[in-house]
Amino acid sequence: MSFEKISEKRKVQNLRNFIQKIESLISEKKYEHASRLISKIKEKEAIFLKDYDNRKKHGVYYTDSKLTKFIIQKTLFKFINYKFSIDLVSLKDLSNLTFEEKNNIKEILLKTSICDPACGSGNFLTKVAKIVLNFIKELKIEPFPKDIKNLILKNIHGFDINPIAVSLSRIKLIRWFIEENHANLKHYYEIKKILNKKIQIKNSLIDVDADRFDIIIGNPPYGNILTKSEKRILKKKNIYYKDAYCAFLLRSLEICKGIVGFLVPKSFLLRQSYIDFRNKFLSRSNLLELYNIGSNEFKHATNEVQILIFGKKEGDNEDLKVYNFPNEEIINYRKQNFDDLRVCINSKCNWNNLAKRFFLYTYKEKCPMCSSNTLPLNRIRIKCNQEIFDIFTQIEKSGDLNYLNINKFPQLIRGEEANGLKRVKEALKKNNGGSCYYLDAKYDFQYFYFNKSQTFNLESISADILKGSSKEYYKGPKLLIKHNNIYPEALYTEENTCFTSSIYSLLHKNRTELKYLCALLNSAVIHFYCIFAINNQNDTTINLNQYMIRHLPIIRISDSKKEEIAELVDLLTKEFKNSNGDLTKAIKEKTIILNDILFNIYNIGNDKQRYMIKEIKKYNPFFKTIF
């Protein structure tokens, strides 16, 4: 038996001993002493969370109390509003209701079943109990039921696969039950019986009946953490299983007959890899409210989160209101009309490449290349207001989202990593006067220019070790694209240059084409598009991958216009070289001229230009200096 399993068994036994000690005191009617012991549950929970080594493996991140309260209240208000066709925003609004309305709400609250399908140590469940009790008190309807807490507990349900978490949930609810009077412990065994039935060690993705609960709330686990057995079962049920939280989103629609309020990652909203899930989820759900949250709530998680409140699709789509947490309304998607763009996923389409995840984008229901049916992309942007949305939609529709397709631009590759990078670094130590520059994305790369700080002998490393077939990505004319940010930085060079995997090398026989692309990738137009149209993160950097770069809206222009832009790129490259990378007055002037040309190509007027630059400067220090 592994140490991990022994340790887990020991924790379970320690918790059992703790509960047995409480029950022994209760049987002796030492309620005050037992109450003091129960109050120490926070210490037990802290030890559990500290020692829970499998949290990352299991995709578990426990939720801040402020967020927990917010999610429960918003979901509960939405449920009540739907039941009675009213518009409660806070408990203060109860004063505007009639006695009959208040009484009806009280009756519903005492019957409303609320479930956390991945309850962990019970943070959501205990907060539900407190909020529902407070809600009923604020209604001020007499008589107030003496057994109110019993009634509330009978409507609270929780499931988790971790036995320690389930035990902690039950004890915390018992602590809530005796908060105002430790003599309530005389009802301990009655309450324990209720909680043993309602809070269970169970896999809610598989083992819970459909249409069982009125409200579902929680913070489901994230990541590709499901077992092969779970994936096999979910696949049979036609439930997306590659990310646990997506499975919970779909499963919640099966087990809930009312409203769901979840804290989940943003990843499914935009990414191409979630198209199938996104369409499946949107076809079954009605998204009601979304609250955009930054990275500060879960510092160890790799993806930012959002609060999503939704219900089953019944009839027409409702509007989705998007907020910056807690209450700044950003955009309202009328009838959930998110996106006009569609995608062809036919593997036999000549324009598609499954290995490189490039698929043809179109606004047509039939693919213009293979005539197969296309799917809606349904990208949900949550970082933009309506004005920003309208601008990047104009950019998207002006450009060609398939311009950088694999047929026309087959040679795009990431720089060295693993063994190749190791050999390059070994060569750098041996030779400081070689035939090839080494470019570090973090220290050497900037717009239109790179610092020539290190060299090595490219011929000393076999072509079999480096990327490409004959070192072609490091020799001759190429466009280098730094992609370890939410927007690209690019430079054109004809010198031998090797680089890390944070940089792409794009080859093309037409040098003017590469220079034109260099100008566009460094432009305010494309930066604005990248910041708002293909990125929902507030603070966390999501790198641009190859399919994002290949689907940038590149506008088609005449060869003569490309030549004009290429000449400006040459001048900027020369100016940067002469200044050793410093931003001179001449560089600023030429950069502004270049951006003016590109704004005009995309038919973006002066007012929109000023607005775009103002927004870009919040994210980009280069443009903050230029403008």
Image (spheres, rainbow, N blue to C red):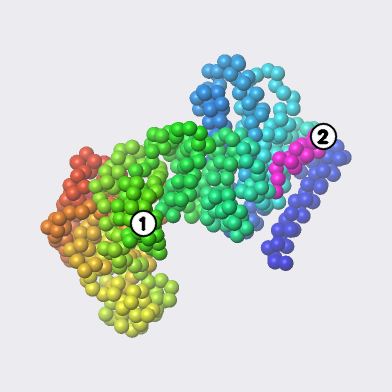
Q: Give residue 384's mark.
A: none
Region of the chain picked out in magenta, as a range: 185-201
Residue 456: horizontal and vertical position, in percent? 31, 79
Q: Position of residue 606 (x, y in %)?
A: 19, 41
Q: Classify mark 1: helix, strand or loop.
A: loop
Q: Amino acid type of disc 2?
A: Lys
| Residue 564 shows up from this direction | no
Q: Where is 259 relative to 146, above or below? A: below
Q: Nearer the viewer, residue 555 or 279?
A: 279
Q: Main secondary structure of the magenta part?
A: helix
Q: Residue 281 appears at what percent x and percent y? A: 49, 44
Quadrant in the rendering for residue 447? bottom left
Cα separation between marks 1 and 2: 65 Å
Residue 442 appears in the picture as rendered: yes
Q: Which residue is mark 2?
A: 186
Q: Residue at x 36, y 52 (%)?
A: 372
Q: Quadrant of the N terminus?
A: bottom right
Where is residue 586? Give x, y as percent.
15, 57
Q: Check disc 2 and report its element: helix, strand or loop.
A: helix
For label 1, the crowd category at 10 Å Cα-Cα, with few meaning under 14, some 14 to 19 and many 20 or more, is: many
Q: Is residue 526 above or below residue 39?
A: below
Q: Identify the disc placed on residue 359.
A: 1
Q: Residue at x 62, y 21 (%)?
A: 104
Residue at point 37% right, 64% down?
502
Label 2: how many Cα within 10 Å (few below 14, some 14–19, many 20+): some
Compare residues 367 and 11 and report the one nearer the observer.
367
